[in-house]
Image: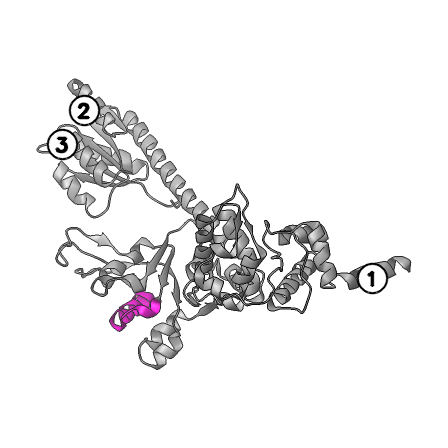
Amino acid sequence: MTDDYRIKFLIVDDEQSIRKLCMTIGASLGFDCSEAESGEAALAQLEGACPDILISDLILPKMSGVELLQQVKNGQPRCEVAIMTGHGSIESAVQAMKLGAYHYIQKPFRVEEVKLILQRMAEKVRLVAERDFLRDRLSTEIQLNDITGSSAKIQDVLRMIARLKDTRTPVLITGESGTGKELVARAIHFRGSFSKRPFVAVDCGALVPTLIESELFGYEKGAFTGALKSKHGLFQAANGGTIFLDEIGELPQEMQAKLLRVLQEKEVRPVGSNERHKVDVRVIAATNRDLEAAYRAGTFRKDLFFRLNVVTIHLPPLRERKSDIPSLVRCFLLDQSPDSPIQIMPEAMRCLLQYDWPGNVRELQNCIERAIALGNKETIGVGDLPPGIREARSGAASGCEPLTVAAANEGDAPSGNATDLEDIERMTIQRVFEQVGGDKVLAGKMLGISRATLYRKLKRYNIGLERGRAVGAASEG
């Protein structure tokens, strides 16, 4: 909940003087106040937007305050409700509290008493909202840690995220399915100044064509069959924050034109309404299609393409950054089994490195989850991998040790001609060794291997020898 959020307060009473007094008290606390003279009128207001706090008289013309409480709690369980009651109805008020009421207020009441109860109810609303925000933030932070890798291409992506996290610049994320486009969008949002504002993800390819407009821009009650109440669209839900339009290339051309107008005018018009509502959102779009080719072919609007394509981040497919596979596997193993480290056998790692991963990082993650579920919970061998990945294994010797998996087997390194796996291994060690300035202890921790294994690999690949000779010569001089 943002600092400038105003608590929405609804007072329900058939006496106008009581309603006016309660609204005055609420306004003095900075609440956004509204009133209703009956339970039916209150429920009608709830169809549009639910209040955070509701105070209702126990005795209403048709529907009692307890009945209203039950309906509100069934539809909007986070709404805090207090019941006002006369002196002879305390038992009913206590029963209302058992049904979920926050408190009861006895008539005639003192202004300070109502003010104190409203303050306490507002504090609970804020605490619940803060708790939910922190839960979402923690979940997102855990997901953001999956942007893993030391390859040059993924490091470029991380640098772009750092530059864009505090800007309102539209961003277009391109890449094959499964490369982590939504993960990058969330990183841009949650790692910067927008982190406490809404983040709304929209899968444009999954929207029903006839309902896309109403989903994005909202609709008024009665706008079409089944529209029993008004509803805000996803753009209004993201107001002040970020909207992520995934698979933007799947939008029909008619909707492309309407989306372009929203981006230009910064306002939406709900279906069935003549009123326009201002929205202030940062747009991040993503696609696995070539939008430039699409607009040249006439299937995507050229003006919308240039509106979205201010800054582009391209996510490389996993087959182009295979050196990141060991570190990704290590992360997935730790996520799935943080308390009981699981070893991945060298031959299984070789299979993972030789496979082309058409489903990219998502496919690799699913593969590891499958292997853990079907394995013995101690090691992952070739037999635990899906058949398609096992078939990608070459007939070459398969004893090479995976370096960046913490629980890897520490057997002797193989001899013979260099393979693609060995090249990846050598480059990974070289890069880490340079990053830590030759600190073998730190390098071993970053690679997830023991010091003895690291020394053996450094000697094998002649890494660090020139640095050692230079240090020795300096000391002799």
Q: Is residue 73 above or below residue 305?
A: above
Q: Residue at x 53, y 56 (%)?
A: 328
Sequence order check, earlier mark of 3 and 1: 3
Sequence order check, earlier mark of 2 and 3: 3
- Secondary structure under tag 2 reads strand
Q: Residue furthest top?
A: 88
Q: In the image, residue 272 lies at what x, y percent?
A: 16, 60
User: Is residue 98 something one can see in this rendering?
Assistant: yes
Badge number at residue 117: none
- Kindly identify the amino acid type of the residue bearing the numbered disc 1: Arg
Q: Count of labels shown?
A: 3
Q: Looking at the picture, tell me which residue is in the foreground, 338 or 25.
A: 338
Which residue is disc 1 drawn over? Answer: 469
Q: In the image, residue 78 lies at what x, y percent?
A: 29, 38
- Measured Cα–Cα span from mark 2 to mark 1: 88 Å
Q: Residue at x 26, y 24 (%)?
A: 110
